[in-house]
Amino acid sequence: MERQHAWELLCQYTKTESLRKHALAVEAAMCHYAKIFGEDENLWGITGLLHDFDYEMYPDEQNHPYRGNEILEKLGYPAEMRAAIMGHASYTGTPRTTLLAKTLFAVDELTGFVIAVALVRPSRSIFEVQPSSVRKKFKDKAFAAKVNRTEIQQGIAELGVDETEHIQRVIDALKSIAGELGLAGNNC
């Protein structure tokens, strides 16, 4: 699997900058965790990059991520990756049995939430975000109301990691691509 091919596939199906940035954020978090767990960074990164590639064209539960899974299967992407992508959407009923699948589920919603926390800072910088500020905003149900907090908690539990440590890992991953996400603030 080549990352460039995956990026081109993402761009073919995903036209909005915000959804592309989400893909990049999840890719960064997956690569970060792959390093921690000693796993294949290419496989994990591409899984994160492509997990929602079909969402813009097929945004309903009857089609996403099912249509994407079909496309990836035809293109020869590995079953482990496709199973993880299916499992990131709880409504599919696909069990998350691998570390890859559990990690994807654990970082998906959290990346969006952490980015939202960074964007409300005056500097709009990920470099100023701390786990404590994420946890504080997490309690405010009106903040980033569309983010599924239940799935964030479930993902942390399934992955079996400490909540604060997990949030910090996601922040660190996002720092590595802050410029691409528009979150570098004054630290560019």
Image (cartoon, rainbow, N blue to C red):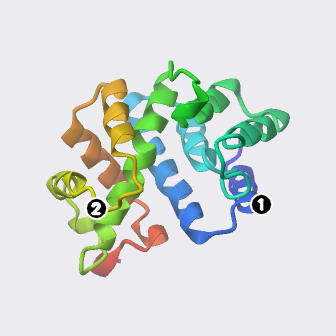
Q: Is residue 125 left or right of residue 35?
A: left
Q: Secondary structure at mark 2?
A: loop
- Residue at the image position 19 percent from the left and 42 percent from the top: 164
- Mark 1 and mark 2: span between their CA atoms? 34 Å
- The N terminus: image quadrant: top right
How many numbered marks are there?
2
Q: Quadrant of residue 7?
A: bottom right
Is residue 126 placed above or below 44 in the rendered structure? below
Q: Residues within 10 Å of mark 1 (few under 14, many from 20)?
A: few
- Residue at the image position 66 percent from the left and 52 percent from the top: 59
* Amino acid on which disc 2 is placed: Ala
167, 2: nearer the viewer? 167
| Rendering coords of residue 135 (x, y %) | 19, 51
- The C terminus: image quadrant: bottom left
Is residue 97 placed above or below 31 in the rendered structure? above
User: Which dot, 1 or 2, sits closer to the camera?
Assistant: 2
| Rendering coords of residue 24 (x, y %) | 53, 57
The residue pinned by badge 2 equals: 142
109, 49: nearer the viewer? 109
Q: Earlier in the sequence, mark 1 or mark 2?
A: 1
Q: Is residue 54 left or right of residue 73?
A: left
Q: Is residue 32 visible?
A: no
| Rendering coords of residue 169 (x, y %) | 30, 45
Q: Is residue 18 visible?
A: yes
The residue pinned by badge 1 equals: 12
